[in-house]
Image (cartoon, coloured by chain):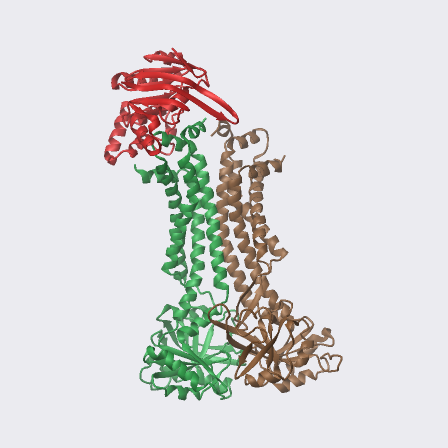
């Protein structure tokens, strides 16, 4: 027969100080664990959101990022004219040739400077980038020295407020609007018109060409055709896959760091739980002996203490989840060395991350409780009954 | 001069909302070199009286004077220092520190007086030899019998050479034979070394060994 | 026996608990110092730069190049000893695409300028008789004689499993195609912060095969005779190109490196927050231990006080116990982090030099451990000190 659960729960609650210190120790570990996952998930999501599953992006063969890519005007025109490219209501192709460069701009509020991606589009490009919405000010007027700035970096770099001027090459551009793009990495960019930005930055041609397909089911065939066209020298990918892959390096580093940090912290927390559980077993020597005499098996005593330890850690896990919740949505930024520019993104505390945190806590409890539970189940009966 | 002088001592405890009077205006004098047995039923206030004399607790009113020093004038550090020099305690359950050896337990009170480590060890050894445990110096309490433990405790009470020894049922947890040995030792301390001893006991046989016996009942003394 | 041994004996009372607590403090301080080490490494990265060198780049960003013609115009400025070119190549090894490492196309002037930072330890014998210019390491002869030759760092060589004389083929990302390189020399860093995971090759090779002779330059490195003139010269260079298509930004090499460090954005802040959480978690573990130790010994504190131990002594005893556990763990963890991380030559990656843990971080770690001990011992110590003897003794029965 199993020892009733309420026995353990009552015992855990009976020593509030030890329970709380141990649980918070476990909880902080869980918080850092969830925080690391949330950091990586937020970063990855920002980049994944940049791409639309319905879009296709073309880059130069061998290029592993937008800035290392180059697509000539001729090549862009050939692709735009392809019959598989969808057309808008006005009959023009839904294709956006884009110049993507990195510019170094001074930070606002902290010393130093960092790289910001500047993306130049054609006016019809917005039809392909349907996630982009002006939230303040207005869209830039094609053909003028105007630019719009992503909402997440607007407060982080100098000259990005509406009405302020920002310099590219030898020309000053006026910021006329701030935009959002469903939390994607586009919100960390500055956008303007190809026709004005290209000469200002002394560039010809594009970095990428993004277009919508008439029939996405024919992607594989189109990919083969375009990649084998000797005039183009391009590679073609699903846009969402491409942008997701741009987050691989950094999100892997974040996850690795997170696992490294929490693994070490977990060792400390497990030792803390072991201390508490050994003390709990020690205090109840006579009680445990009584249970054994009453006919409870050593196995059920062991299980009972394991449950107590897991329960104790789960309280910690719950505390950890509560502590982690407020970091959801906090915007932070770092340089994505794959795109060589700064990306501002929000921590994303997801339900699976919370669940992982709880499982992690339970695991710490099980590991920390194992030896003390074994100790409890194996204690010599006669000596324990006599009372230590 | 009396070794211990108690003047009109009252002790009232607050237990929840109720006031419990433990000692009710007791006056008592114990002459230097006396060996007094204090008897009485449980809850009569014997231990409380012992604690007041040892300066472990304070009377609600009245005064306790030990070797000419009024304890009401001593507080905190001064009281602790005074206790280290003037009072030796012997408990029913010995109260040895389990992680220290016999000689280390005996050395403990000497840490409080300026003394070289060598001198400390010499005195602790002498005290243990006196109680007949010269061959058990490095034993831990759990390796000793109850009677031996109590003898270590007596050596600890003696080592700083206090004038007054306070014993709270020193034989209460021992078998007859060991109890007898301890009583003999206490008597010896009184006769040979002139220690003033106040011993709380339930055992009339033990009380017979004392020079005087006092009875405490419901907070009042009777002879 | 003395006061100190009394404390030690008490620590030995529950050895398992003492050791578990000590170990948890150890791992926590190991982590604390490792995180501090990342910040130290960022500091170290700034030091790569020298105050006597300037770096000129395109004002828009590093991604934009400058024409080769700038070199001669910069070189004639009084105060400039020599000028070197450096282009980021950004290729990957197709056999090992996950192992990112840096490659730069450099001209011959690069090596004398950095002779104080790196030293060649191994080189192929020269295939032809080449005159090595004055001031250059004769070991470079073989490299100079061959256009596709390269010089690689010792660590990189080990990491990729390459050998001297081997030809490795990289695939370009910025400059498309397959690029064969032959390893002709191996360098070791003279300053740790310089790193040993970079590959240098002929800028000429890059120009001819990757730029069709358009001769774009990524950055110019200016070696100055007198660091006192650095600020003036930087202004002079930038003024010279201010109105051209490729305006420049010139700064000390140190400031240039600091720019990379500042690109890490909020990451250092995040690490500090984590460090704080680690310290707090460990404080709880230690405090719990001390509370347990206190609760078990209440009656003993009563006995000690009966024997005449003053409240202050009991207070110090408990505090000393806590401090010894945490200081022990702190020493083990902090020194362990320094030895383990610096000994293994661990590299965080990206553009950073090998990871360091500064002594100041180790000292901070030990200080934190001591503080944790003091704080965790404070409540039990205070409770032990104000314990009333009569109540403490009563708990025996």
Residue C142 at x, y = what percent? 38, 82
Q: Which of the 4 image quadrants contains residue C293? A: top left
Front residue of A129 and B214: B214
Tint of chain A: brown
Which chain is represented by red in the image?
Answer: B
Res. C339 in view: no
Lateral position of residue B26 relative to residue A126, left or right:
left
Is C39 above or below relative to A165?
above
Residue B46 at x, y = what percent? 41, 19
Res. A187 in view: yes
The structure residue drawn at horizontal position 45% and vertical position 20%, both measured from the top left corner, is B22
Is C344 above or below relative to A127?
above
The structure residue drawn at horizontal position 47% and vertical position 59%, both measured from the top left corner, is C272
Quadrant that contains the C terminus of chain C:
top left
Front residue of B131 and A218: B131
Is B210 above or below relative to C187?
above
């Amino acid at each position: 027969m199993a020892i009733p659960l309420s026995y353990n729960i009552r015992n855990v609650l009976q020593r509030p100080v030890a329970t709380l210190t141990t649980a918070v120790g476990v909880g902080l570990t869980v918080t850092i664990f969830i925080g690391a996952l949330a950091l990586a998930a937020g970063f990855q999501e920002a980049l994944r959101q940049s791409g639309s599953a319905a879009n296709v992006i073309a880059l130069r063969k061998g290029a592993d990022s937008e800035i290392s890519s180059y697509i000539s005007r001729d090549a862009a025109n050939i692709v735009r004219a392809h019959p598989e490219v969808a057309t808008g209501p006005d009959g023009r192709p839904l294709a956006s040739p884009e110049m993507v460069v990195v510019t170094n701009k001074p930070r606002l509020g902290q010393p130093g400077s960092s790289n910001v991606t500047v993306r130049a589009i054609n006016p019809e490009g917005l039809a392909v980038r349907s996630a982009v919405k002006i939230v303040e000010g207005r869209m830039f007027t094609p053909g003028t020295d105007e630019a719009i700035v992503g909402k997440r970096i607007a407060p982080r770099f100098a000259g990005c407020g509406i009405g302020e001027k920002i310099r590219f090459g030898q020309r000053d551009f006026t910021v006329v609007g701030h935009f959002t793009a469903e939390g994607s990495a586009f919100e960390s960019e500055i956008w303007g018109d190809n026709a004005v930005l290209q000469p200002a930055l002394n560039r010809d041609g594009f970095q990428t060409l993004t277009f919508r397909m008439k029939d996405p089911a024919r992607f594989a065939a189109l990919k083969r055709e375009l990649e084998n066209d000797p005039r183009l020298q391009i590679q073609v990918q699903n846009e969402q896959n491409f942008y997701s892959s741009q987050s691989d390096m950094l999100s892997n580093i974040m996850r690795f760091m997170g696992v490294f940090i929490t693994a070490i912290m977990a060792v400390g927390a497990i030792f803390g739980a072991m201390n508490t559980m050994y003390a709990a077993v020690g205090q109840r020597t006579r009680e445990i002996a009584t249970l054994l005499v009453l006919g409870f098996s050593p196995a059920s005593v062991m299980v009972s203490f394991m449950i107590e330890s897991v329960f104790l850690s789960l309280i910690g896990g719950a505390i950890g989840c509560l502590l982690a919740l407020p970091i959801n949505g906090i915007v932070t930024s770092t340089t994505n060395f794959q795109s060589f520019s700064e990306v501002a993104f929000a921590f994303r505390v997801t339900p699976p991350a919370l669940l992982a945190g709880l499982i992690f806590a339970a695991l710490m409890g099980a590991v920390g409780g194992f030896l003390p539970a074994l100790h409890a189940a194996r204690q010599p009966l006669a000596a324990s009954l006599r009372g230590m | 001069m009396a070794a211990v002088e108690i003047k009109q001592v009252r002790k009232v405890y607050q237990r929840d909302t109720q006031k419990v009077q433990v000692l009710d205006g007791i006056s008592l004098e114990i002459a230097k070199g006396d060996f007094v047995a204090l008897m009485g039923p449980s809850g009569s206030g014997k231990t409380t009286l012992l604690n007041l004399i040892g300066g472990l607790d304070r009377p609600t009113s009245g005064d306790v004077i030990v070797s000419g020093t009024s304890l009401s004038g001593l507080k905190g550090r001064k009281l602790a220092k005074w206790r280290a020099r003037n009072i030796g305690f012997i408990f029913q359950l010995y109260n040895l520190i389990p992680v220290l050896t016999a000689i280390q337990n005996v050395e403990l009170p000497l840490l409080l007086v300026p003394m070289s480590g060598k001198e400390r060890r010499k005195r602790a050894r002498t005290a243990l030899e006196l109680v007949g445990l010269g061959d058990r110096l490095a034993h831990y309490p759990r390796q000793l019998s109850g009677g031996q433990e109590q003898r270590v405790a007596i050596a600890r009470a003696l080592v700083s050479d206090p004038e007054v020894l306070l014993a709270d049922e020193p034989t209460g947890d021992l078998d007859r034979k060991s109890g007898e040995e301890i009583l003999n030792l206490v008597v010896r301390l009184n006769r040979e070394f002139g220690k003033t001893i106040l011993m709380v006991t339930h055992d009339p046989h033990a009380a017979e060994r004392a020079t005087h016996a006092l009875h405490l009942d419901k907070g009042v003394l009777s002879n | 026996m003395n006061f100190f041994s009394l404390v030690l004996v008490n620590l030995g009372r529950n050895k398992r608990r003492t050791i578990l607590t000590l170990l948890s403090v150890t791992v926590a301080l190991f982590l604390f110092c490792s995180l501090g080490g990342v910040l130290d490494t960022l500091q170290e990265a700034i030091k790569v730069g020298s105050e006597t060198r300037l770096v000129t780049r395109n004002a828009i960003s590093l991604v934009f190049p400058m024409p080769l013609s700038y070199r001669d115009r910069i070189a004639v400025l009084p105060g400039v000893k020599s000028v070197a070119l450096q282009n980021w190549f950004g290729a990957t090894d197709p056999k090992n695409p996950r192992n990112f490492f840096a490659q730069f196309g450099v001209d011959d002037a690069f090596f004398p300028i950095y002779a104080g930072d790196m030293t060649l330890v191994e080189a192929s014998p020269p295939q032809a008789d080449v005159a090595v210019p004055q001031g250059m390491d004769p070991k470079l002869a073989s490299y100079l004689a061959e256009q596709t030759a390269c010089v690689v760092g010792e660590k990189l060589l080990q990491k990729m499993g390459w050998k001297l004389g081997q030809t490795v083929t990289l695939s370009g990302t910025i400059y498309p195609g397959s690029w064969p390189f032959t390893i002709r020399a191996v360098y070791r860093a003279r300053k740790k912060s310089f790193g040993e995971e970079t590959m240098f090759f002929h800028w000429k090779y890059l120009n001819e095969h990757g730029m069709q002779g358009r001769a774009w330059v990524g950055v110019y490195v200016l070696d100055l005779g007198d660091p006192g003139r650095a600020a003036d010269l930087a202004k002079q260079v930038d003024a010279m190109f201010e109105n051209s298509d490729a305006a420049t930004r010139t700064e000390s090499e140190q400031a240039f490196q600091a720019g990379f460090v500042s690109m890490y954005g909020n990451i250092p802040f995040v690490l500090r927050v984590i460090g704080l959480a680690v310290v707090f978690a460990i404080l709880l573990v230690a405090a719990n231990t001390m509370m347990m130790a206190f609760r078990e010994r209440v009656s003993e504190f009563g006995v000690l006080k009966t024997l005449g131990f003053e409240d202050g002594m009991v207070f110090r005893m408990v505090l000393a116990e806590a401090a010894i556990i945490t200081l022990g763990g702190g020493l083990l963890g902090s020194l362990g982090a320094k030895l383990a991380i610096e000994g293994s030559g661990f590299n965080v990656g990206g553009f950073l030099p090998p990871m360091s843990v500064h002594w100041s971080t180790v000292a901070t770690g030990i200080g934190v451990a001591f503080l944790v001990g003091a704080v965790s011992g404070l409540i039990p110590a205070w409770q032990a000190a104000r314990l009333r003897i009569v109540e403490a003794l009563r708990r025996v029965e």
